[in-house]
Image (spheres, helix red, strand yellow):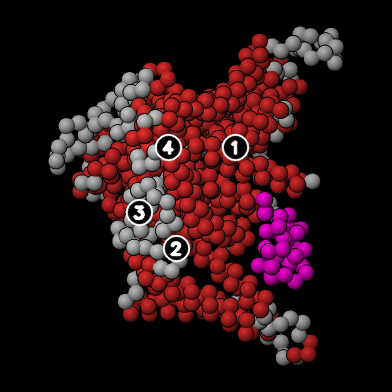
Amino acid sequence: MTSTATRPDPRPEAEPDAKPPLALGDRVFKALSVGSGALIMVALAGVFIFLALEGYPGLSVDEDFYNPATTFLGYAGPLLFGTVLAAVIALVIAVPFAIGIALFISHYAPRRLAVPVAYLIDLLAAVPSVVFGLWGGRELAQHIGGASVWLEEHLGFIPLFAGPAAKSGSTMLTAAVVLAIMILPITTAICREVFAQTPRLHEEAALALGATRWEMIRTAVFPYARSGMVSAVMLGLGRALGETMAVAMILSASPVVTLNIISGQSPATIASNIASNYKEASPDGQAVLIATGLVLFAFTFGVNFLARYLAGRGQRRMAR
Amino acid sequence: MTALDTRPERPETRLSKPRLPQWAPLLVLAVAAALGALAWLIGANTALSVLVAVVAYLVVMPVWSGVVESRRAAIDRLATGLVWSAFLVALVPLVWLIVTVVSNGISTINPEFLTYDMRGVLGNEQGGLYHALIGTLLITGLAALISVPVGILAAVYLVEYGAKSRMARILTFLVDVMTGIPSIVAGLFALSLFVLIFGPAVRLGFGGSVALSLLMIPTVVRSTEEMLRLVPDDLREASYALGVPKWRTILKVVVPTCVGGIVTGVVLAISRVIGETAPLLVVAGFTSSVNMNPFDGRMMTLPVFIYTQYTASTAQGLSYAWGGALVLIVIVMALNIVARIIGKIFAPKTGR
């Protein structure tokens, strides 16, 4: 293979059980790669430690910084609510589409169409979030604003659409729709993978018993893919929780707690609040923002942790 | 099915229920499209007309199928219709976004826009994004310089050295979890780090690189790991059998075999982080002039340029934001295409 191939082993008499001492190159290279692995772990721990160090003073600064609330909890509470609300609405919109598209790619599309479609959906993931924000804020918002007026008139009895509708469309609904588009690729990609892993024999057995294609999917594909689908949804949730720019550029935020998603008064999310208030923050204000960032990190870390754990458990169960 | 239908009719021996002909979905689709067109002619807007057509298809097809075939077939046809429309609807935002960005941005792009910075630009004077372009290239380049070696070596550890050890399993899991770190948290991390070292008012381009590498490393590790696992063990064993030490085997046999895949993964990872805004906004700050030194002072980047122009909300600011968005999208798409081409060229090397 290479010139080294001709070099004979200098230690032919070594005992078969004893490990031969590693060559210098081997030791250096192994140390480097182990070091890189360790560095990644250290970095992750570092995120926690540095955010905690810098954010801790933010828990108890002067009351003015928590305006209009007076404590850190009062300040972070509405933000956390806004974060979760936006993410959950985005999920409600995105998940049915993601499952539909994943099924389309794995089971419905003609073979020649499936690959380009998967590529197109991945392309959606490549669009930078700031461009999504620009498009959502200037283009989509106007259309959603028009639709919100209709929603208020006809579905106003649902608390979500209580109004008064903001014609500008700088609302939670617009932000959630953009978030939904942004989490579509990852959710679709993972669903697609688990759907495609369904054992061929399960599917053919279902079809042989006379199931229609939809019945085959319901009885063979979905049960097999359940844990994978759950983890796909959770990963989408994680993305939606942490998305910053799109929300910051669309939402006109105010510190309220409301389910009303079409009015001009909607709570900011943690991430968008950090991005839009960062410029003018003093060191103390900066500490408060970093502390909210720590809350966000802990929250998304938990969600992602759970998602990966569920996915891993599902894989082990299926492997048996 | 059609072959059966041409035989003389003998109902008593029919084994299957009657089925709709193969062209039935197409016929219903045509009818639904006609209904949508009618709605459009009456005066409904485009979105509403398309909605009418989709709903018409989703109602007519199952009902027809339910009458002729069976309830189960009707549900199956409904599901097929829903899956197809999910796919078609999902294409709308992609096409819409690209059309909007191109049509709004194209008029802003000219040689001055690409080569001027915004230093001292007042009112409607011509400015540009040169400083942002430089910043983006420097910061992303440095981030790649940090994350590529670390990511690839960590993947080598996972595949070649760690193999099933406890640390390797924990590392795999942490890397997975790390892919979900919100970008703004990465920015805050880099900021906290440099604030602790240099004091609270610090803003520097290198901080942006650190934040971006935190986002980039997991992607590089994952893609490299996958590629390394594709290399057949036979190759490694053949090399060991010839007495080649492990590190040379990795460098001369394993990595060259899958170098195309690794490069593809790296380029895709770069295209992911090049559009990140939030972390750079927080640690690299913004400025209107060119800064060539990432270790000192604020540094503008393309995404932050778009954001600041957007928040300025003047007519010129908006057109600059669209122009910047077009430039950014072109860069990202070009990186994606380059990655695919590299992947295509080197793909057969795995020998499978």
Q: Secondary structure at mark 2?
A: helix
Rendering quarter of residue A2: top right
Q: What chain is tagged by disc 3? A: A
Which residue carries the number 1 mark?
A: B176
Residue B159, by quadrant, is top right
The residue under the point 56% across, 65% down is B83
Left or right of residue B319: residue B84:
right
Same subunit, tags 4 and 2: yes
| Neighbourhood count class around disc 4 (C-alpha, 10 Å): few under 14, some 14–19, many 20 upward | some
Q: Which residues are magenta?
A: A199-227
Task: Determine if the magenta segment contains residue A204.
Answer: yes
Q: Is the residue under label 2 in contact with that under label 3 (CB below 8 Å)? A: no
Which image quarter holds the N terminus of chain A? Answer: top right
Which residue is identified by label 4? A71
Instruction: Please report whichever mark, 4 or 2, sits nearer to the chain's N-terminal start.
Output: 4
Q: Amino acid at mark 4?
A: Thr
Residue tagged by mark 3? Answer: A265
Mark sitting earlier along the chain (3/2) = 2
Read off the residue under disc 2: A159
Disc 1 residue type? Asp
